[in-house]
Amino acid sequence: MDRTRRVGLVDSGAAAQPLLSDMHYIRKALEPFASISTGDIETVVATAPDAVILSDVGQIPAGEVEKLTKWVEDGGALIRFAGPRLAAQGDELLPVGLRRSSRALGGTLAWEEPQGLAEFADTSPFFGLPVPPDVLIRQQVLASPDPELSRKTWARLADGSPLVTADARGNGMLVLFHVTAGPDWADLAYSGLFEQMLRRAITAGRGEAIEDTAGTYMPQLTLDGFGRLAGAGTNAAPIKATEFNATVPSEIHPPGLYQGPAGTRALNAGAGARPQLIRDWPAAARLLGDAQARALRLAGPLLSAAAALLALDLFIALFVAGRLRSRWPKRRAASLALGLAALASLSLLAPERAMAQYDYELMPDGSYRAVSTASRVVPLPGNGAPQKQVEAALEMRLAYVETADSALNARTRAGLIGISNILLMRTSVEPAEPHALNLETDALELYPLIYFNVPDEAAPLPEKAVQRLNAYLRTGGALVIDTRAGATIGSQTDVSRLQALLKGLDVPPLQPVPQNHVLSRSFYLIKDYPGRYAGRRLWIEQAGDAAAPRGDAVSRLFIGDADWASAWAVDRNGRDLYSVDGGAEQRETARRFGVNLVMYVLTGSYKDDQVHVPALLERLGEGQGNGDDPRLPGPDPDGGP
């Protein structure tokens, strides 16, 4: 049992924005006592970890579910954290059933104030841990009513609702934290309790004893008298687990990091100590007051040096221009020129030496290694990449999903060419010709936006394609799904039709675009999002509460049925290919929506900044107080606000 825990973190797009990801908080909590590996489910399971942690993964691909289930039944501990995606769609690898919504402040199943944690029951693995009063929960996923729910609950909120649930699965354990691992839903990640709960969840999940009463802690890295962390010396002695909390740093027990039954623990040099004023000074010490303290003022010397350099620069400029040659003999002028050239060369060489600086990197053994900060030339990889990938990497371009319907593919391509031309003429975005993509083989991450025109009677996407789309969306890509069913009068977008087609796609809850959303003003000021058909509903990821998209709060999924590609489509000569219900004015609005969509994907919530409010009010006419509704500008592009 005297070993470091091996924990696998399933990477679900955390590498794109590591400091904004929930995995950042999990990693920081695990680092003191665990050896961490990162990758997909197959990769981390292959390392035979003690536990695997998933953060806000709603849909696990079927192939990986089988591997993960077998690993759990063989004795693994699967620890999961909730989030918007898990609240929208769960799976079978959960200890309890979940309701298809989350409870939040101001929500349907709301509480009036954030909830604190209740004391841990004596049957819980967390029993004995102190509960900080400042840890508050603002949102959680709710467990479905179950006669066994009380037995499966490890931690509760003050109102009695489950915070952590667990259940055995074969020889292993399924553990669910009903909040996010980051600070979106709760303050738990900011507390030291988070690390202790993770430590005990891993231990209990493996069916091992929680008590830290047996064994010893061996010194690994210790601090010397200069505060440098180095390998433990021969004089450093181990500490019994039962005596670790009461141990005072000494010569035989130096402060530092000790490895033991519960992982790595720190013996702090200044634990419980407070700095005190020195009142008894040695007789040889001479104390200086504020008035006697000497300060070296550098303003004068630096200004003098700057003036001298300015005068020298002026003198050189006059000499090079020939203004001083008539007053100086040629030989003396040549000598002076050589001297100035030598001085200039020395001034150029001096900064080069100053720039030859080094940084220091902490090594695993506690020592430091000097690392040069000088620029290096990194050779490009070989020519093994396909030409399509090279083109996509060199020039920004839109892309579309290639389907079995060649006529639909041609229509989609013409639509993306049309909106790319509009972007090229009206904005600073200069997209190249769009690419057709195979979701199973092409590099999706090279494209900021992928357009999926859904064919009639489309078959469900292959599992590999869904997995790659999930990875693409988690790393910041944008997917536009158009069912082209907007010609049906009296009905709105039927999102349920896509459930079978996109089965396994891991997305948070969706909502229609709300009023005053940044998408309506990311470049043009628009009120509707028409395509070939007007008055259609556009669905995006839910925002405006704790379930909002992470990072910059920008939706990465857009679903509608207005047939935007047909409204954008042009031929080789730039002529419109398909009719639009509302004529030229609706086509212009559709193009403006396309511009807004691309600008929103590229710039995020930039236009949501309050600094743009005066300009937007002026464009809307509200700054003049006339109260008139803004008139839709004509087809002549007028640029964005």
Image (cartoon, helix red, strand yellow):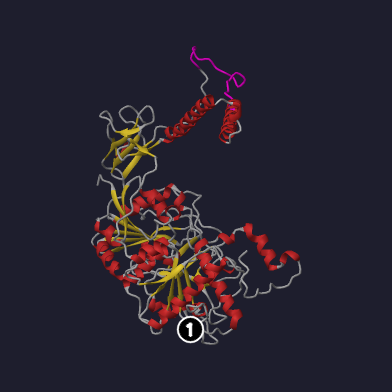
Q: Is residue 511 above or below residue 133?
A: below
Residue range corresponding to the magenta coloring: 281-298
| Mark 1 neighbour density, 10 Å: few (under 14) some (14–19) many (20 or more) | some
Q: Quadrant of residue 523?
A: bottom right
Q: Is residue 500 above or below residue 479?
A: below
Q: Quadrant of the C terminus?
A: bottom right
Name the residue at 51% across, 50% down: 134
Query: Does the magenta stretch mainly form a helix, a strand or a loop?
Result: loop
Counting from the top left corner in percent of width and height, residue 150 is at: 39, 63
Q: Which residue occupies the extreme left position in the image?
A: 74
Q: Is residue 145 visible?
A: no
Along the line of sight, the residue nearer the viewer: 523 or 117: 523
Counting from the top left corner in percent of width and height, residue 88 is at: 44, 69
Along the line of sight, the residue nearer the viewer: 561 or 507: 561
Residue 218 among magenta residues = no
Residue 452 lies left or right of residue 627; in this view the side is left
Q: Is residue 352 visible?
A: yes
In the rendered structure, which amino acid carries the disc numbered 1? Ala
Q: Is residue 575 above or below residue 23?
A: below
Counting from the top left corner in percent of width and height, residue 377 is at: 36, 46
Name the residue at 54% across, 69% down: 595
Residue 295 among magenta residues = yes
All told, the count of numbered labels is 1
Along the line of sight, the residue nearer the viewer: 314 or 371: 314
Q: Which residue occupies the extreme top position in the image?
A: 283
Residue at label 1?
A: 485
Name the residue at 51% across, 71% down: 421
Counting from the top left corner in percent of width and height, residue 228 is at: 36, 31
Residue 178 lies left or right of residue 233; in this view the side is right
Along the line of sight, the residue nearer the viewer: 571 or 30: 571
Name the residue at 33% across, 46% down: 33
Mark 1 lies on a secondary structure that is loop
